[in-house]
Image (spheres, rainbow, N blue to C red):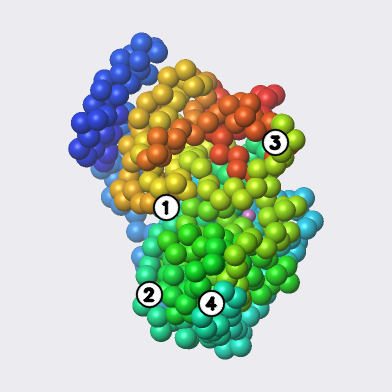
Amino acid sequence: MHARVDSSSPPGDEPAATARDRREFLRRGVAAGGLLAAAATVRAAPAAEAADAPLAIPEWTRAPGAATGAQPYGHPSAFEKHVIRHLRPNDKQYISSSTRSPLQELDGIITPNGLFYERHHGGVPAIDPARHRLAVHGLVASPLLFTVDDLRRFPSESHIYFLECSGNPGYNVYGKTAAEANGLVSCAEWTGVPLRTVLAEAGVQPQAKWVVAEGADAAAMTRSIPLEKCLDDALLVYSQNGERLRPEQGYPLRLLLPGFEGNMSIKWLRRLHVTDAPVQSREETSKYTDPMPDGSARRFTYYMEAKSIITAPSGGQRLAHRGFHEIRGIAWSGHGKIARVEVSVDDGATWHEAELQAPVLTRAITRFRFPWQWQGQPAVIQSRAIDETGYVQPTLEALVAVRGVNGTYHNNAITPWRVAADGEVSNARIKAS
Ligand SMILES: Nc1nc2c(c(=O)[nH]1)N[C@H]1C(S)=C(S)[C@@H](COP(=O)(O)O)O[C@H]1N2
Ligand SMILES: [Mo]
């Protein structure tokens, strides 16, 4: 049984806007040595098994399976044990540390809770929700103290948003896999109460301009947030992907500031102090600032700018077959929706529009895909995101030309992957040996 995959006419409707790009793509494909000459065939069964042989009955069909309810809380298949968060092997800072989401193993736009990236400055506290409180005070008409149950009584909302650490990936651009190169980003459906609802309950005074959020962890992570953001789409979150927050993600209560650098989405939230000025916390002075070439420093760099990365094929993987391959990846922007993603398969010489997978949501991860014929030629493949503001994801060289090399945060550069003649995929920034 063969599933026919014709790379020159991908399934589904072709948006009118891409027809020109596709013609251009085909023309260049032919010009570039018949890249698309033959329609690809994806075999549904190993060629060694004759299609007319009877289907063997495997052992799992011959006897009943495990008892229903054997796992009161479900786990992935035992065959998926390699799909785990990535912890840097030399990471000795086990309290102030991070783990990366295995982007190369994931499909769709939702990161499963057990694979959501983590970044903790003082370890993961074990908080008893019955004893946890949120204080709202400062420039308000009535200071308030909430239990988690109190907050759950407010009208709730659910939204899909990405969260990304501004240190993703820093200026270590040599990550071997997609996780190592850019895995400090994840995306979930968050449920909670809009922060503006709770602030309205307390009654914000006219001179208020900032809200200082503080965590209940040993790091007492503290950040000042412009009141404008708090009254816009900021969410007090208690659930993630349908279940209560995991301890690592801020159980029982976190702040979520869509599109803003991850460190501002304070986990284990215990206090909201309404003020008229930023508090100048450690996290907005010594940390999370970027020294610029002219000696100044970028501070309060809220927005995560548009980024994308190809997750398949990506570093550490191997193309086992010549012929059709769907290039797949993810794109996101703190400024809103992804408008386009472009893919290059010739080391950046030419770019072609990828197809976006619905839904394309504001400040959420968007999937893209692009049909590719690989006939064993060495190639460098990469993607660049363009968001609804028209902003185009830069190359690393373009970013460094503006920012210099002393900053660590907000590196949203393109990640190029090298595909070798033997099908090995590696980070194109690592010199081939
Ligand atoms: N209280 C508290 N909040 C915190 C942190 C922390 O260490 N303590 N880390 C911040 C950073 S740097 C990031 S990137 C995100 C990470 O969220 P996650 O672990 O749910 O992915 O949480 C932010 N909120
Ligand atoms: Mo972060």
Q: Say which amino acid is labelled 4.
A: Val
In this rendered view, identify the residue nearer to me: 91 or 198: 198
Query: Which percent across, then down, holds residue 358?
Result: 30, 48
Q: Position of residue 175 (x, y in %)?
A: 64, 39
Q: Which residue is mark 2?
A: 156
Which residue, given by chain and number where applicable, does mark 1 sit on? 364
Q: Which residue is mark 4?
A: 140
Q: Are marks 3 and 2 in contact (CB under 8 Å)?
A: no
Q: Earlier in the sequence, mark 2 or mark 4?
A: 4
Check contact, mark 1 vs mark 2: CB within 8 A. no
Rendered-image quadrant of the C terminus = top right
Quadrant showing the N terminus: top left
Farthest front residue in view: 207
User: How many C-alpha atoms fall within 10 Å of the one at disc 2: few (<14), some, or many (≥20)?
Assistant: some
Dot 2 amino acid type: Ser
Q: Is residue 65 above or below residue 102?
A: below
Q: Are marks 4 and 3 in contact (CB under 8 Å)?
A: no
Total numbered labels: 4
Compute the Cα span from label 4 to label 1: 32 Å
Q: Nearer the viewer, mark 4 or mark 1?
A: 4
Q: Quadrant of residue 290?
A: top right
